[in-house]
Every structure is written in C-alpha cells, then in structure tokens.
Image (cartoon, coloured by chain):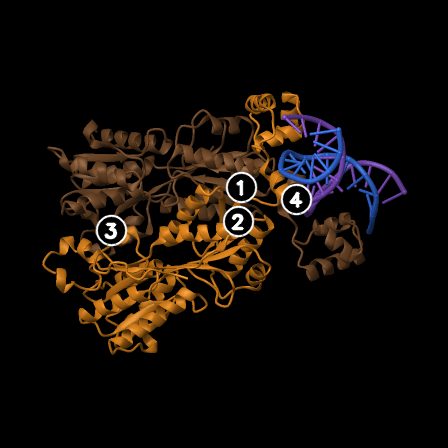
Chain colours: A brown, B orange, C blue, D purple
Amino acid sequence: MTSIKDVAAEAGVSVATVSRVLNEHPSVSEDARTRVLAAVASLGYRPNAVARSLRTDQTHTLGLVISDVLNPYFTELARSVEEEARALGYSVIIGNADERPELQDHHVRTLLDRRIDGLLVSPTDGGSPLMLDAARAGTPMVFVDRWIPGVDVPVVRSDGRGAIRDLVAHLHRLGHRRLAIITGPAATTTGQERVEAFREALEECGLDLPDEYIGQGDFQADSGRRATERFLDLAEPPQVVFATDNLMALGALDAVRARGLRVPDDIALAAFDDIRWFVHTDPPITAIAQPTGELGRAAVRALVDRIEGRAPRSVTLPARLVVRRSCGENPATNENPATNENPATNENPATNRSQT
Amino acid sequence: MTSIKDVAAEAGVSVATVSRVLNEHPSVSEDARTRVLAAVASLGYRPNAVARSLRTDQTHTLGLVISDVLNPYFTELARSVEEEARALGYSVIIGNADERPELQDHHVRTLLDRRIDGLLVSPTDGGSPLMLDAARAGTPMVFVDRWIPGVDVPVVRSDGRGAIRDLVAHLHRLGHRRLAIITGPAATTTGQERVEAFREALEECGLDLPDEYIGQGDFQADSGRRATERFLDLAEPPQVVFATDNLMALGALDAVRARGLRVPDDIALAAFDDIRWFVHTDPPITAIAQPTGELGRAAVRALVDRIEGRAPRSVTLPARLVVRRSCGENPATNENPATNENPATNENPATNRSQT
DNA sequence: CTGAAAGCGCTTACAG
DNA sequence: CTGAAAGCGCTTACAG
C-alpha cells in the first residue's frame, strides 16, 4: 500500500504538508497543494483510516446493534440509519443480535474494541452488565425502538398505544370479543408495552385478557406459530390473534394454514409492524405501522449530537393503524372492498407527536 | 480508555509482557501471566483493535457489499455471511449499494480505506474502475451471486438455468404460451443470465420471446410495477409474467391489483428468489429458490482461504423450482390444492451440483 | 507557510 | 522468560 511517505517523496514536501493538504488545513501554499494533489492522484493514494483513527481517536463510525436482520422492520431501520449517518459523514457497522443476548453482547464488545464513536442499540434484553457499563462509562449511546429503563441514554422510539387502542376499537366494532395476543420477550420494553396497551384498551371496551389468551413469543416466526397452535387448541379459542411483530404474524399464518383454517373467517389476525407484503397476503393484513425511516434518522441525529458535544434529545413518534381485511370486513367501507386500503389508511391520522 | 500501559503498571511488568499474555505467546512465566490477567480483569481492559490493526496490518474484518438490504434475499445472504465469518474469527462490515453503482463505489472505497482483510461483493454493475483496480491490486476478493466477467476473482453463485427450464416446462404444461419476463439490469450477470436461460427454455418448447414481452427492470419493486403495467397495456398481453427477483414480483402484484385483476386467473406470475411470504400471498407464488445460506457460507470460506494463503475455489450451486398456485392449478396435484406446497417442492430435487 | 518530532496503542524482532 | 526499542501511518502542537 502506498503511504503518506510515498506521497511526500513524490511531491517533494514533508509528510506534515501532505497531511495538511489532505485535511484542508488553510496554511498551505498553492504550489505545495498542487504538487501534493498531483502526487496523490498519480499514486492513487488513499489515507489509511486505521492510522488516522489511532491518532485522532475518532473513527467516524457508528455501531448499530439490531435485534434481528431477518426482520424487515429492522432492515428498514438499518437502511435509514446508514443513510442519515452517511449524510452526516459517518459510516455504520451493523451487528445482528438475532434476538440473542449473548450475540448482542458479542457485537457490542467488538464494536467497542473497534472504538466506534457511538452506539445505537435496540436491546434484546433488560441490559447486560457490558451494556450498562458502557453507558455508565460515557460511551455515546442512543436506544432505538426498544430501550433499557433506568439508564441515562436517550431513546428514539415510536409509541404504539394510540394505534393499539384504535385497533382494539376496530376489532370491537367488528363484533370480536375474545381477543388474544402474542407478546415479545418480557425483558424488552416493546414486549411489555404492547401487552399493557392491549390490556388497557380491552378494559376500555369492557373486555378482559385471560391468561390463556396471552401467548409468550420472542419476536420470531416460530414462537408465533407455536402460540397460535396453542390458541387453536383451546376449548374456546380466541376470535382474534394480535401478533406484536410481523414475524410472529407470519408464524401465526403458518399455523392457521396448517390447520386448513381461513383468516378472517375462522380467526382474525392483526400485527404490529407494517410491511409491504401485508398488502398482498391472503387476506391483506391489518397492521400497526411505525414511522421507521423517521426513527432511524432521528436516532442518528441524536447520537451524532451526543458525539459532537450537543445535547441529544429523546424522540417519540406515534404509530398508526392500517386497516385491511384480516379482521373481517370493515362495515364502513364494506361496499367497496377492493379499495379498502386507502381510506382505511387515513382512518387514524398521526396526531400526538411528542419530544422529550 | 485504559491502555496496555496501565495494565503493565498495575501488573508490574512491561507492556511487551502484557502483549505476550494477551496474544498467548508461549514464553511467559506462570507468575507474570497471572498478574497480567488479574490486572486486565480489575481494570476491565480491552485491547484497542485500531492500534493492533495498524501494527499487524490485519483487521480480521471482511467487507460485504450487497446490492440491496431491503431485498430479503440479500438480507439472508448477509446473515449467513456474518455467521460463517464469526465462526472463522472475522467480523463483517456490510455496505448497501441500493442497486446504485456510485453508492457501491462509495462503500468499496470506505471499506478499502479501513483496510478490511477481504471483500465480498455482489456487483451492481459491470465493474467500476475502482473495483477492477482493487481486484488487480491483489485485494482478496470474492464475488457472490453476481460477478464481473474477465476478472480473476473466484465466484460463488447459484445456477438458475435448470430451475428456469423446469419453470418454463411447468408453464407450458399448464397451457401458457405467451410468456413475459421482467429482467434485471443488463450490466449484472444475473440480469443477463436469467433472460438468456428463459429464452433458451422457451425455444426448447417451440416458443419465442418477442421484444414487447421483455420488461427492463432494475431488481427493485417499482420497475416491476412499471413493466407489468406496460405488459397489461399491450394489445395482446402475456399470460404469464416471470419476475427475475422477488421485489419486482412485489411490484408486479401491485400493478395487477391496481387494475383489479387476479393472479392467476387474469395473468400468471412467477418469481426468481423464494421468500417466506410467498407461501402466504394471494395466491401463493411459484418461485425459484436459491440455497442462500450455503452461498453465503461458501463465499466466506473462499474469501478466508484467499486471505489466509490457501487457494480459493469458485462454487456453483443449483437453484430449484418451488411450484405453488400463482401460475394456475397444477394438474398433477389438482385434487388437493391445500397441500399443494409440499409435493410440489420436491418436484425438482436438486441434482446438478458442480464445483470449479 | 513548512518541517522535524512526538505520540496515538499496540506487536515483535533483538539482546540479555 | 523479560524488557527496551523500533515502527505501523497518520496528525498536530512547536519552532522557525
């Protein structure tokens, strides 16, 4: 590899001057600058980022630890994170935790060893010692989507309560009374919140949530399948299953299909997280959509603020209900099922937008 | 951050000794080793990977430049790559090209600047000067999925010809005669090969492929939508649309749905790349499945072989046809549509497995 | 405006 | 077995 020394030799200047030209330091003569630039071009020189990082103690790199790359929600989040980071002059290294705490720790450790400038994480659990230590040690950090209570780290997430209330009202209006939920791990905030919000919304409608209608899942498809099978085995199965993420909804569909049953005739289905395929599934699936791209961008901005010495802000954005046909026909738009999607989408315009 | 000096001071030895302990160098006294280890533990010391890389000229990092993170095929590929790399002691940095050559170059450049040990790429185009230079300069490199002809770099990919021939035979058997294709960019090998294989397969059935039945796509959903609209506007629209990736199939579904038409009654649809949602779409989609996980693992093994001085091997694995209902009822399994999936899956067991 | 020199945190021949 | 020292490729006060 050609180094800064080669460039200096070629241009007939010192390495200090080469470095100044490369870093656009003002005090370099026009003559020196041209000669250096010419040398850089003719040698095809590219500065060694490793050496530069060691010297400056900055890597211009953000670490992003997501819960699961195979989940389209996180994939979209990762994409918007990378995009915004790139716009701000950072690159991002993604670590996939696969919903496994040890793997999450592995990535956090590797990222820290590489001296990334800041860490974006969507925690898989309640917080390992490693992550808590990192936060306490002052590593610039921001939580996205999920967070760890009691840690002084900004959180960028969406609030699904309103949308879940809308969903339950929608289900109640369609005549459903026995509603079940497939939850995420209790150690995750999203896992907890979605059940709580669901339970509260049921109460508002005068319904309750019996234990056998709570399926313990882990945000992965298999757990959705198993939970749904258990629901279907009940003496009195639920009329609706609400999967708290899209992968568990996929598993639920597998289970329903395996029994030769139909959605929504035999059992209705709704999901948290909207994905493009939900428009084309059989039937199209009613889902709660998060402003994923916005979340990713806001998270990066918060982290970069923190890194560059500005005060980072937590951000909470509302999610919204997108009604499709998986819970039964919507009486309101019944007459024209083919175009059900659009009016329903606007049923619940984003309203409450809060920033802390 | 605590450095090796702090550990040396705490343990009462030189930094050389600390380094030896950390790198499991044999000649260290038992006594020194215990003291160093104790110091490491009590200080919570973690070696600075940046400094180590600068010194050893190895980063133990692989770069992976994929064409599109939002494409589940590449996401699955990325996951298997990371898994195998981790097993071999490497981490991976993913760059998402979004099917844009400039963005691809941006990532290759960044990765090279970081002095990754090797590069895994699925090229978005015919090869930029940057990439060709890197290959010529001897950067350890392996192509996955797509490749650039005329460059001396091992290729790990799957061969879809057999499966495409099976697909065309299946369509012909169902009575379809007017078959259209939505291709990928002509600059990509997969873009080219899939049309060629399709055209050859049609010829074997005595059919031809008129220009108006070739929709130029770019492997993204929008292009699939536009191509399909153009097909539907034809005086004599095709009876089948074969989308050469899953995202363009999604776009095709959007277009069909927007016209109020039905698959397969009004038009049949098949796709290259099988994804989990295809089981639950309306109707379930006939697709060509690649051994994605295998490809990712083989690619990593080839790259690591190259990095560690062993001879890397190119690998070609067969893809296989998975028949579902999007092209019309399969006469053979007609009597039991509900369980169509399983027998159909086995219709074309993977046969030709070649290694070069 | 420019260069010599120190130093970032490691590893590794070299001597002992 | 151990330590002093050089050096990886940069950047940046410091002097001039």
Mark 4 is surrounded, within 10 Å at the Cα level, by few (under 14), some (14 to 19) or many (20 or more) other residues, namely some
- What x and y, as percent, mark residue B13? 66, 24
Disc 3 to disc 4: CB gap under 8 Å: no
Of labels 3 and 4, the one closer to you: 4
Please give the residue where the numbered disc 1 appears in the rendered image: A62
Please give the residue where the numbered disc 2 appears in the rendered image: B308
Image quarter for residue B122?
Answer: bottom left
How far apart, in angstroms, are the residues tagged by discs 4 and 2?
Answer: 26 Å
Left/right placement of residue A105 relative to residue A199 reads: right
Disc 1 to disc 2: CB gap under 8 Å: no
Q: Amino acid at mark 4?
A: Arg
Identify the residue shown where x is 80% and y is 58%: A31
Q: Are marks 1 and 2 on the same chain?
A: no
Please give the residue where the numbered disc 3 appears in the rendered image: A284
Disc 1 to disc 3: CB gap under 8 Å: no
Q: Are marks 1 and 4 on the same chain?
A: yes
How far apart, in angstroms, are the residues tagged by discs 3 and 2?
Answer: 50 Å
Q: Amino acid at mark 1?
A: Leu
How far apart, in angstroms, are the residues tagged by discs 1 and 3?
Answer: 37 Å
Left/right placement of residue A183 relative to residue A299 reads: left
How far apart, in angstroms, are the residues tagged by discs 3 and 4?
Answer: 52 Å
Q: Quadrant of the C terminus of chain B?
A: bottom left
Mark 1 is surrounded, within 10 Å at the Cα level, by few (under 14), some (14 to 19) or many (20 or more) other residues, namely many
Q: Amino acid at mark 2?
A: Glu
Of labels 3 and 2, the one closer to you: 2
- What x and y, as percent, mark residue A147? 42, 32
Please give the residue where the numbered disc 4 appears in the rendered image: A52
How far apart, in angstroms, are the residues tagged by discs 1 and 4?
Answer: 16 Å
Q: Are marks 3 and 4 on the same chain?
A: yes
Of pointers 1 and 3, the one earlier in the residue sequence: 1
Q: Secondary structure at mark 1?
A: strand
- What x and y, as percent, mark residue A141? 51, 34
